[in-house]
Image (cartoon, rainbow, N blue to C red):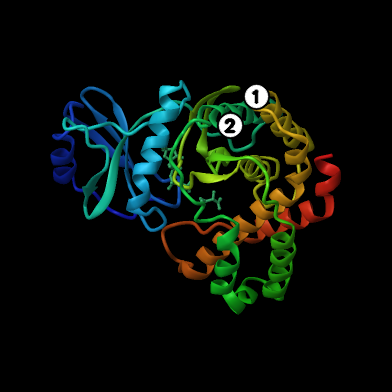
Amino acid sequence: MAVYTQVSAEALSDFLAKFDVGELVSAKGIAEGVENSNYLVDTSKSRFILTLYEKRVAADDLPYFMALLDHLAERGLPVPPAVPDRDGTLIHALEGRPACLIQFLSGVSVSHPTPLQARAAAEAMGKMHKASADFARDRPNSMGVAAWRPLFERCGRDLDTIAPGLYDRAGKALDTILAGWPSDLPRGAIHADLFPDNVLMLGNRVTGLIDFYFACTDIRAYDLAVMHGAWAFDAKGETFDPAVGTALVEGYAASFGLTDAERAALPILAEGAALRFFLTRAWDWLNTPADALVTRKDPLAYLRRLDFYAANGNALFA
Ligand SMILES: Nc1ncnc2c1ncn2[C@@H]1O[C@H](COP(=O)(O)OP(=O)(O)OP(=O)(O)O)[C@@H](O)[C@H]1O
Ligand SMILES: N[C@@H](CCO)C(=O)O
């Protein structure tokens, strides 16, 4: 599930009355996702996503995300901008949470991407990087390299309750990654969480890039590294699909371009991306009761990716 905040029919009708979107016809909570509360809302005029922002999305960051979505949508990217109310306001409050009414996009997210689908998604990411090249706003990556040691320390020795020896193992990986982290690669606005569930597709065509709530200014090739880890393995991180991996790198290179320096850095960027998702999942694992309604994501699936990249990264991206 991802409906942390319940919205009553009365509150939703009052909310929608501020917009020129017709009358409320139906609303239902969306099960997918773990970060925010999402509802599928049908009105007499159209279909929308209502998002109420929960723990990890700071209200102060919403203007950045909404400006980026507008910027990309204006340049023809298939991203869902927020719908303005009659006064032009994009960001609202509903049931005590920051909330936006978002344009609905068609398509479904694929759970087992083919190389053709992976290539199309990586090309779309390349187009997004192109379109955001003149986006003037900046947002530091709150889940970026500077956040990893503090997050690791906050998890602490409790990591060993997930698997014996995990604290020492993760600590060693963290030291290696921080020591080798590149500082001179091109930066720009990146998505930073472009997992298959954040790409809507119809067949081999990308119809939507969604969930920009980790978007930030960071190393562009890091975005590709995040995508590689998310798309080219099975969910448990046990099996790597080389055809999907190649399709991602070549799709991005064909669409945006990849310098020799960026390509050479992909192994360490991929290790860093794997560590990032390992750490946030481990933190959530340790801090979400096992019987909570939300399904916890397995941190070890990202430790396996980390091990894979450490052992094979250089050969993989050569
Ligand atoms: N603009 C949109 N158009 C169509 N469907 C959408 C849109 N935005 C979200 N969805 C649907 O809602 C689901 C959850 O949305 P989203 O991924 O933004 O949630 P989240 O809680 O932020 O999740 P995550 O765990 O990926 O961070 C998506 O999987 C998709 O099915
Ligand atoms: N994509 C993330 C969850 C949202 O940040 C994960 O799978 O761990």
Residue at (39, 42) in percent of width and height? 64
Report the residue marked by disc 1: 255
The quadrant holding residue 291 is bottom left
> Vertical placement of 234 versus 18: above or below?
below
Viewed as shown, does residue 99 lie left or right of 81? left
> Vertical placement of 204 versus 85: above or below?
above
Furthest toward the right, the residue is 315
> Vertical placement of 27 versus 43: above or below?
below
* Amino acid carrying mark 2 in the image: Met
Which quadrant of the rendered structure holds the C terminus? top right
Residue at (69, 61) in percent of width and height? 178
Q: Label 2: state its secondary structure.
A: helix
Furthest toward the bottom, the residue is 157
Report the residue marked by disc 2: 125
Q: Is residue 241 visible?
A: no
Q: Can residue 206 be seen in this view?
A: yes
